[in-house]
Image (cartoon, rainbow, N blue to C red):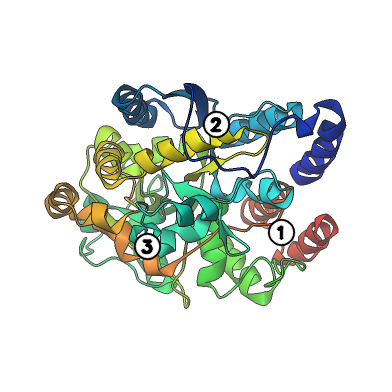
Amino acid sequence: MKKSTAVLLTLLIVMGAFLSGCGKKEEGVQITELTEPVTIQVWYSLGAKYSAPLEVIINHFNESQDMITVEGVYQGGYATTQEKLLTAYVAGEPPVLAQLEQSLVGSFVANDALIPLDTFIKSDKAFDIKDFNKYITQGATYNKKLYGLPINVSTPVLYLNRDLFRKAGLDPDKYPTTWEEAYDIAKKISDLGPDIYGLRIYNSGWIIDSLFHQFGGIIFDKNNTQCLVNSKEIKEAMGFWQKMVMDGVAVYQGGKDGSTMDASGAVGMVMRSTGSIAWFKDNVSFDWGVAPFTLGSTKAVSLGGGNIYMIKKTTPEEQFAAWQFLQNLTNTENQVYWSANTGYMVSRKSAKESPEIQAILKEDPRYNVTYDQLEHAFARPTVEAWPEIEDLIQEAMTRIILEGVSVDILDQTASDINELL
């Protein structure tokens, strides 16, 4: 078992208090204006297709005034950005803003490394937090405090190969609404040939967390003090996926190989991010559709993607500048621009109701699906050791599905996780 990210974070922050002179910067002090120009950085994890619109927004903000200069800095994927931010924070020189994937924030909150935005919001009469979709902002809310504002938030949806549906004698407009229906459809599609699969499944954290919820299971108790990954509901969920693979109606494949399969037309259904709509448009030649991923007795989908957070060990001037940029980044106009150029959801009600977004939704109704299922969305786990815990769950799932071992190995997984908790 590798060292827990959360334990490492705690130790490094404690060490950093001695090594970096963490008291050298003021915290918790708000100012109302800048007296001299300030340059701040925002670290992000968005690849080329998604970073380009963000940089446009940054440049427009910089050109709109002469007191604040924002520098956007790409730091790699979600995990890499988290690690770099940890290092910078311990050194006492973090950026004032950083994009973090929702499940990677718990450690920073637990160690008091982030600045809640509630005070900024209350003192800013022009900022209407009620315009934000409450199902989306729940992913950045911890202990009833809002720590971040959404940028690339998404939910997983079900992508359908409508051509394979037709070849299997199925109506492509009738998507599955339960896992039993999904199994039956997947079987008919997989019967088309040995290299055709009805469903592609994989062990991405937010996908399997959705699966568990849909079977009525949750990973932790309400106080996050006990792991419930060995509950009968979660065992049933993993056992169901194991059966699908063993019966040959599903394939267990993730990463780049999984995307290659999706583009090849050999998969009838797959769960992927809302943001994958743009990927499908660029990489897929067959007729494809989007359906809700709310299968199971409980209608539930996990929130994914990232929010922008304000980091401590920064000056009041930097924090003031960061708040001015956050307002601009998430205003209605930029929400519309961001969504139109990336395919990600807008988080503001006013942005969704705008003529531009309404035109997109009318022209391509596939974009509607993620909004339609938002009422069933739940926030990712907020436990401090989540990255390590997620690894243990993914390892167990891979053994259950690929090696055919009993779901009872989850008893040991739960025990290992409880040690971390």
> Within the image, what quadrant is residue 262 found in?
top left
Q: Nearer the viewer, residue 361 or 233?
A: 361
Q: Alpha-carbon distance for marks 2 and 1?
A: 53 Å
Lower position in the chain sequence, tag 2 or tag 3: 3
Determine which residue is flagged by label 2. Answer: 318
- Relative to 36, is 418 on the left or the right? right
Determine which residue is flagged by label 3. Answer: 130
Q: Is residue 21 above or below residue 196?
A: above
> Within the image, what quadrant is residue 18 found in?
top right
Across and down, in percent, residue 110 comes to 72, 52
In the image, what residue occupies the spot 61% across and 30% down?
A: 80
- Relative to 224, is 179 on the left or the right? left
**Quadrant where the C terminus is found in the figure:** bottom right
Residue 227 seen: yes
Q: Nearer the viewer, residue 169 or 370?
A: 370
Lower position in the chain sequence, tag 3 or tag 1: 3
In the image, what residue occupies the spot 40% across and 35% down?
A: 260
Q: Amino acid at mark 3?
A: Lys
As helix, strand or loop, the secondary structure at mark 1 comes to: loop
- Relative to 284, is 322 on the left or the right? right
As helix, strand or loop, the secondary structure at mark 3 comes to: helix
Q: Amino acid at mark 1?
A: Val
Residue 240 seen: no
In the image, what residue occupies the spot 62% across and 74% down?
A: 233
Q: Amino acid at mark 2?
A: Glu
Q: Is residue 99 above or below residue 290?
A: above
